[in-house]
Image: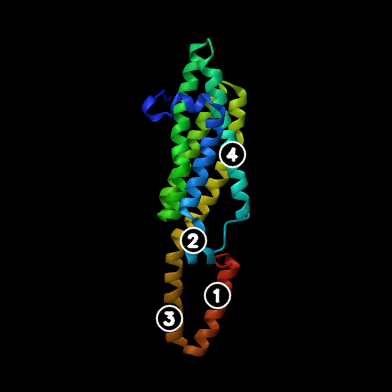
Amino acid sequence: MTTFIPNLTLPAQVFSTPAISILLPVVLGAAVGYSVSPKQQTPKKYLELKQPPLRPPPWVFGPVWTTLYGLMGYSAYRAWTVGTTSLNPNVAALAKQGATLYTIQLGLNMLWTPLFFGLKRPVEATVDIVALTGIVGYLTYIWSGVDQVAAWALVPYLGWLSFATYLCVSNTTIITLSPCLWASVARYRSSINLKTGPLTGMIMNLGFHRALEQLGYLR
């Protein structure tokens, strides 16, 4: 059970003003994305690895996140407005508790891109997005006791976060394991050349490279 923590909660004006509530996550998300510039920071070796199955094309992420940020902001506005004007003290308390959770999840959301692309910390980024998904799931539950519209507005966001968690875990596994893989490949190729000679070694290495492609480690 969470509680309302004013120092960890956005100002009431953010939640009570629809334009601010909706535009704030959209603007913050765009600002963080442009500041990190993931295309320039993505390691070359990562681009050479096969992407996880079901990964959407890069152009999908911008429109999807813009829509989800807008829905997230509307959900916050709706839950706060309905909850704080309710005559039921329990509903009002849930709305404020949700506001604290909302602020925390927004911070975790904005932290993921700098962690993964900027600082190149995929493990920490995975921890971040797992925590984020759990908090949003609980927030959806909390706000379902305040207003059903607010709760349903978070459902697409929660669904996309679940999918994004799968992508993040898959990419983290690839990035984390790939140095070990390439080190093993280098040792294997060296041993082949020493035991069989350069020409035979080259032929065997070519077959090994194709095997890696079939296993999905190379695109």
Q: Residue at position x 57%, y 29% from top? A: 75
Looking at the image, is mark 1 or mark 3 earlier in the sequence?
A: 3
Is the residue under label 4 in contact with that under label 2 (CB below 8 Å)? Answer: no
Which label is found at residue 191? 3
118 above or below 144? below
Percent position (x, y) of residue 99?
47, 26
Cα distance in 3D space between marks 2 and 4: 25 Å
**Observer-nearest of 74 and 193:** 74
202 above or below 69? below
Label 2 sits on a secondary structure element that is helix
- Callout 2 environment at 10 Å: few (<14), some (14 to 19), or many (20+)? few
Closer to the eye: label 2 or 4: 2
* Residue 215 figure quarter: bottom right
Q: Which residue is mark 1?
A: 209
Cα distance in 3D space between marks 3 and 4: 52 Å
Looking at the image, is mark 1 or mark 2 earlier in the sequence?
A: 2
Name the amino acid type tagged 2.
Answer: Gln
Q: Which residue is mark 4?
A: 68
Percent position (x, y) of residue 3?
41, 23
Looking at the image, is mark 4 or mark 1 earlier in the sequence?
A: 4
Name the amino acid type tagged 1.
Answer: His
Q: Which residue is mark 2?
A: 40
- Callout 1 environment at 10 Å: few (<14), some (14 to 19), or many (20+)? some
Closer to the eye: label 1 or 2: 2
Label 3 sits on a secondary structure element that is helix
Cα distance in 3D space between marks 1 and 3: 15 Å
